[in-house]
């Protein structure tokens, strides 16, 4: 069943009206019906633009979590050729929540690493709802080192509510696995592009998020905690999640203004779930543009810029 968000219902209603008129037109063509269809289609575009330009942070969080939104492997399928997935961390095992492999991104050979969610119960259980175990982060680092050895750029596609908080993950030291990645990614001598394509939750996102360029899809979010988690702490109830979303400044637009991210990847009108191909085309070009900027930089300059980028976070002035 298709997921429909509350603020999308007027659009869906108008679309249904257009579809009904098109069915009538197909069975019994009429100039009057054709004119009415054109008017409604124009109104539909205006309505979508109006809704899209007035989205609040909580509504963008809802779009970021949309089940029809393209996931990591959807983008790989639409953008990449010659994708060869590699498995295992060489310590414990593999992690289906964190696929990774080498591929051609346009005319560039890259390593693609990311979080993968599922669209139904069976797939979500396989992918652990996009929450990676320690094995996922250790696998990611193993392959990043391989990419670094052969000077292959790294592209990470982030989409997770957070790293898996279960007992098994704690026993296998999830915190150490993420912390290790933070340190080691800072030292890799190959260009790294990180893109938050949906949810960018806490350390689970940051574990593959140390990069020379950090981009967000237009309706993605990037935050130290989920709006529900923040609301539970500050207001003692999850119903205050919309207020928390605004307070957290987690949207791409706020993060760009604060200097936390380097760019915003535009999405199709209404969100990436409406047009996977257009979203993939925009993402592909954004990554290629970022790589073109970085590939000419000497290693020392690349590493220094990466360090300074993250070192300046948290600076503030008092009014």
Image: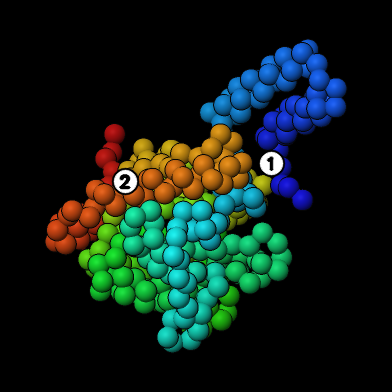
Q: Is residue 257 left or right of residue 15?
A: left
Residue drawn at (39%, 60%) of the image: 104
Residue 123 visible in the current orientation:
yes
Q: Quarter of the image holding residue 102? A: bottom left
Q: Earlier in the sequence, mark 1 or mark 2?
A: 1
Q: Which residue is mark 1?
A: 5
- Left or right relative to 303: residue 82: right
Residue drawn at x 36%, y 50% is 287
Q: Residue at x 71, y 47 (%)?
A: 3
For label 1, the SS is loop
Specify the label residue 121 is tagged with: none
Q: Looking at the picture, does residue 265 appear above or below residue 170?
A: above
Circle 2 SS class: helix
The residue at the point 70 percent across, 38 percent down is 6
Residue furthest bottom in the image:
91
Q: Is residue 77 above or below residue 318?
A: below
Whole-percent x, y for residue 69 in the image: 60, 50
Badges 1 and 2: C-beta atoms under 8 Å apart? no
Q: Which residue is mark 2?
A: 289
Other residues around mark 1 within 10 Å, as few (<14) / some (14–19) / many (≥20): few
Residue 217 visible, this angle: no
């Amino acid at each position: 069943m298709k997921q429909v968000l509350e603020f999308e219902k007027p659009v869906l209603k108008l679309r249904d009206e257009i579809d009904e008129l098109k069915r009538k037109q197909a069975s019994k063509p009429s100039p009057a019906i054709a004119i009415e269809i054109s008017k409604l289609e124009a109104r539909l575009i205006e309505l979508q633009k109006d809704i899209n330009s007035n989205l609040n942070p909580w509504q963008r969080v809802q779009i970021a979590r949309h089940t029809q939104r393209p996931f990591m492997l959807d983008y790989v399928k639409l953008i990449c050729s010659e994708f060869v997935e590699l498995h295992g961390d060489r310590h414990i095992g593999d992690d289906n929540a964190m696929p990774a492999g080498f591929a051609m991104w346009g005319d560039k050979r890259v390593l693609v690493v990311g979080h993968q969610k599922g669209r139904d119960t069976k797939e979500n259980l396989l992918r652990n709802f996009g929450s990676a175990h320690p094995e996922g982060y250790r696998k990611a680092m193993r392959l990043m080192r391989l990419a670094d050895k052969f000077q292959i750029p790294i592209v990470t596609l982030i989409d997770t509510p957070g790293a898996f908080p279960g007992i098994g993950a704690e026993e296998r030291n999830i915190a150490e696995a993420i912390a290790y990645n933070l340190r080691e990614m800072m030292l890799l001598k190959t260009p790294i592009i990180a893109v938050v394509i949906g949810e960018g939750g806490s350390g689970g996102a940051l574990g593959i998020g140390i990069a020379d360029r950090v981009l967000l899809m237009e309706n993605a979010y990037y935050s130290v905690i989920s709006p529900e988690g923040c609301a539970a702490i500050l207001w003692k109830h999850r119903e205050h999640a919309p207020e928390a979303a605004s307070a957290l400044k987690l949207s791409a637009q706020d993060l760009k203004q604060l200097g936390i991210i380097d760019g915003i990847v535009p999405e199709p009108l209404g969100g990436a779930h409406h047009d996977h191909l257009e979203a993939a085309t925009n993402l592909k070009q954004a990554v290629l543009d970022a790589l073109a900027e970085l590939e000419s930089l000497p290693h020392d300059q690349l590493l220094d810029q990466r360090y300074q980028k993250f070192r300046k976070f948290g600076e503030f002035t008092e009014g």
